Amino acid sequence: MSGTPAILAKGIAKTYGTGDAAVQALRGVDLQASFGEMVALVGPSGCGKTTLISILAGLLSRDGGKLQLAGTDPDALGNEARTLWRRQHVGFIFQQFNLVPQISVLENVAIPLLLRGERRGESLDRAAQLLERVGLKGREGSAPGKLSGGQQQRVAIARSLVHGPSILVCDEPTSALDGATGQRVMELVREQGCRPDRLVVLVTHDERIFHFADRIVHMDDGRVTREVDAKAEVAALRAAQGMERSS
């Protein structure tokens, strides 16, 4: 994948509904990202962030615009080929976890590997390693419903990373985590997701994790309004907080 942009999006549009009930979720979004990056999408609720990452993950088709994800347009693939492409290349951390309640935590994490036809024993071993990395060693046999919300979020994060996806898409990955756990989990996401052949795109309102990103992309009303270097954004936030404390 060397030299291939991870994301090349131009004029991405998406509308829900028709006629008077139509809602334009995306109004011509341009976005480019490279492997090795972490890009944070921020903006008010309802501005189109979740719709955009769903398109970038191949979960949702766009209505207009051009898109290349690691050199592939998922909308140009048939349903079966698109599903196979997504299993191979995409990891998604859902805000609502989307864990399977009937199977163990360990089996939930192993799902992406098992769907690719990898050996069960090796898949479970890899899943156990990731669970240990997110602080859940000893809970492998638990049912998801026996875990707290924060623990379930960590299971979801381990599941998204287990198959080494080219594109990792995260919807509020620290929303259910305390500050210390959120930092630890983001360190793992950064380590595993921002390699020369991988990219992380995350939606967040959590300013405490901005420093993990390389760029902050601001959205509003279905459009990208500005992009800033994450270090500059963090410095500006800290300066503003310092002024508030001194006033």
Image (cartoon, rainbow, N blue to C red):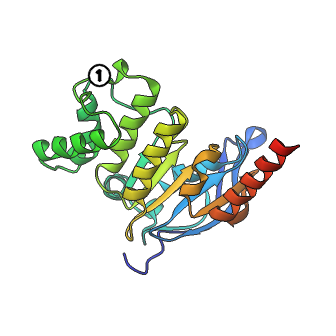
Residue shown at the point (52%, 56%) measured from the top left: 201
Residue 9 falls left or right of residue 78: right
Residue 59 position within the rendered picture, expressed as x and y whole percent measured from the top left: 47, 48
Spot the residue most to the bottom: 3
Q: Indicate left or right for 69 with 155 as reference.
A: right
Q: Is mark 1 on a helix, strand or loop?
A: loop
Q: Position of residue 118 (x, y in %)?
A: 16, 50
Amino acid on which the number 1 mark rests in the picture: Ala
- On-image quarter of the N terminus: bottom left
Q: Is residue 62 visible?
A: no
Task: Give the residue drawn at x 36%, y 19%.
Answer: 145
Task: Decide: few, some or many residues near mark 1? Use Cα within 10 Å; few <14, some 14-19, many ≥20.
Answer: some
Residue furthest to the top = 146
Q: Which residue lies furthest to the right in this view?
A: 247
Please state the horizontal and vertical placement of residue 239, each as a whole percent of the image.
77, 55
Say which of 238 and 52 sits in front.
238
Q: In which quarter of the image is residue 131?
A: top left
Name the residue located 39 percent from the left edge and 66 percent from the top edge: 195
Quickly name the residue at label 1.
143
In the displayed structure image, the side of residue 142 where residue 174 appears, left or right: right
Q: Residue 148: tell me if it is visible.
A: yes
Q: Quadrant of the C terminus?
A: top right
- The residue under the point 34% across, 36% down is 135
Give above or below for 149 relative to 182: above
- The answer to whether 137 is drawn above or below residue 1 in the figure is above
Residue 180 drawn at (x, y percent): 49, 38
Taking 127 as reference, is 157 left or right?
A: right
The quarter holding residue 211 reads: bottom right
